[in-house]
């Protein structure tokens, strides 16, 4: 992509003036960013795949190469070649810009030979004093993998993407150079496993990040930099954080502390009280408020269910009270109305059907009845109040009732009575 303005043209020009990787940087990348192996044969002769040295080794696991001093993992194999790669970053400055340079190291290690890695610059982030970023990098090609770069393309202005963001959060060369403003805002010598681009942007634009860095509250700073939602939490509860810090309280488990503060606020606690926001045992205090919130939730749920039951009962009586006490029989089978909501649930539970849980008692144009043969309930019937036909007639566990035709005959014989109740 061609530079679109003077700033981008200047950054491209500066990028061309960046120095190549130094020998210490290359050695650090080779020693620290990939795993090293010692390939051992059955005879016990082991070869360091980094320097090519051979020695007799009987130990398993990790050991030091006696020649180059590298910690290697012993692997019993006849293989002779390892191919590996890693991404790493070098953080430096250029004419007031904070620069995060991204590199790819590719290594092919052959048995008996010294490793000769190759290094390729993938791109760089340029952050100005206002925290705005510009990306210079290789062209991305279609593909789901991080390595989907056109390696022959020039380093040009590119749109930021997930690949650059991921690579810039990989290994960081420990000798970090930062701008005077970032140094003034509290940065010392380490990124503390925080995404470098995000951390520098926050230090340049967010006074809260500066305060946390200078107070050495790294866990809180890491939480703030993790996501915009976390940053919102820090903004909202900043007064509580300052009170806790002024009282010498060390927040070790930051996510748990924020959960605790939110529950404390939810329960009406004073989130500006040092005694409450700085508990001696955070885990215990957290668990206590989890129990309190759960109890209140259960109470609210019970109250909600009680109010719903009152509303259901009023609606049920409005719809069905005219049918209460209704009974019909042919001398063998007796059919009765269901006269309470509790009875719907009891019948549903006893017969493993859903007349209660599905709230048949609130259906406007149907009526639910029960049929008995002697003292035994043989069916639960739903009829239409439009034409008094049977919609469904269920035996135990939604089975087919063998008396359906006989029940239909009883209902047909009593249509007039049901219609009179409907008009009442």
Image (cartoon, helix red, strand yellow):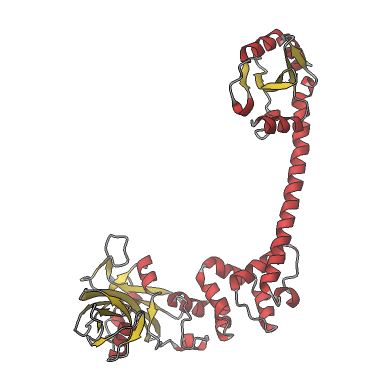
Q: Where residue 23 sits in the image (x, y, percent)?
A: 28, 90
Task: Write the residue at 55% across / 65% down.
Answer: 229
Q: Where residue 67 sits in the image (x, y, percent)?
A: 27, 91
Q: Quadrant of the C terminus?
A: top right
Is 330 above or below relative to 211? above
Q: Quadrant of the N terminus?
A: bottom left
Q: On the rendered structure, is 127 left or right of 250?
A: left
Task: Write the residue at 43% across / 87% down.
Answer: 179
Task: Write the residue at 46% across / 74% down.
Answer: 198
Quadrant assignment, res 146: bottom left
Quadrant assignment, res 328: top right
Quadrant assignment, res 45: bottom left
Residue 294 visible in image: yes
Q: Where residue 364 sits in the image (x, y, percent)?
A: 68, 25
Q: On the rendered structure, is 310 left or right of 16?
A: right
Is 188 above or below relative to 163? below
């Amino acid at each position: 992509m061609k530079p679109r303005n003077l700033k981008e043209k200047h950054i491209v020009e500066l990028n061309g003036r960046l120095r190549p990787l130094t020998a210490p940087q290359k050695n650090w990348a080779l020693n620290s960013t990939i795993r090293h192996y010692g390939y051992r044969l059955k005879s016990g002769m082991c070869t360091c795949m980094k320097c090519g040295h051979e020695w007799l080794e009987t130990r398993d696991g990790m050991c030091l190469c006696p020649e180059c001093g590298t910690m290697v993992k012993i692997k019993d194999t006849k293989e002779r070649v390892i191919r590996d790669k890693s991404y790493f970053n070098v953080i430096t400055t250029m004419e007031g810009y904070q620069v995060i340079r991204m590199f790819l190291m590719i290594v092919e290690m052959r048995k008996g030979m010294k490793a000769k890695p190759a290094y390729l610059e993938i791109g760089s982030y340029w952050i100005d004093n206002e925290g705005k970023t510009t990306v210079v990098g290789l062209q991305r090609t279609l593909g789901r993998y991080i390595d989907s770069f056109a390696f022959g393309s020039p380093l040009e202005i590119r749109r930021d993407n997930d690949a650059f963001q991921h690579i810039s959060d990989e290994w960081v060369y420990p000798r970090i150079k930062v701008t005077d403003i970032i140094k003034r805002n509290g940065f010392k010598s380490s990124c503390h496993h925080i995404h470098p681009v995000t951390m520098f942007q926050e230090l340049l634009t967010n006074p809260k990040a500066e305060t946390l860095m200078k107070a050495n509250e790294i866990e809180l700073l890491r939480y703030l930099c993790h996501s915009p939602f976390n940053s919102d939490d820090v903004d909202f509860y900043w007064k509580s954080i300052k009170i806790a810090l002024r009282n010498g309280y060390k927040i070790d488990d930051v996510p748990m502390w924020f959960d605790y503060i939110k529950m404390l606020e939810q329960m009406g606690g004073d989130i500006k009280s040092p005694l409450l926001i700085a508990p001696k045992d955070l885990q215990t205090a957290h668990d206590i408020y989890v129990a309190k919130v759960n109890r209140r939730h259960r109470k609210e749920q019970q109250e909600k269910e009680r109010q719903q039951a009152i509303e259901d009962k009023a609606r049920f009586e409005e719809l069905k009270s005219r049918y209460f006490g209704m009974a019909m029989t042919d001398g063998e089978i007796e059919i009765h109305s269901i006269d309470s909501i509790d009875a719907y649930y009891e019948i549903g539970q006893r017969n493993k059907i859903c007349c209660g849980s599905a709230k048949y008692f609130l259906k406007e144009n149907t009526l639910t009845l029960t049929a008995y043969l002697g003292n035994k309930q043989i069916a639960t019937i739903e009829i239409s109040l439009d034409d008094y036909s049977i919609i469904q007639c269920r035996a135990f566990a939604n089975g087919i009732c063998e008396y359906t035709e006989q029940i239909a005959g009883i209902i047909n014989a009593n249509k007039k009575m049901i219609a009179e109740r409907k008009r009442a």
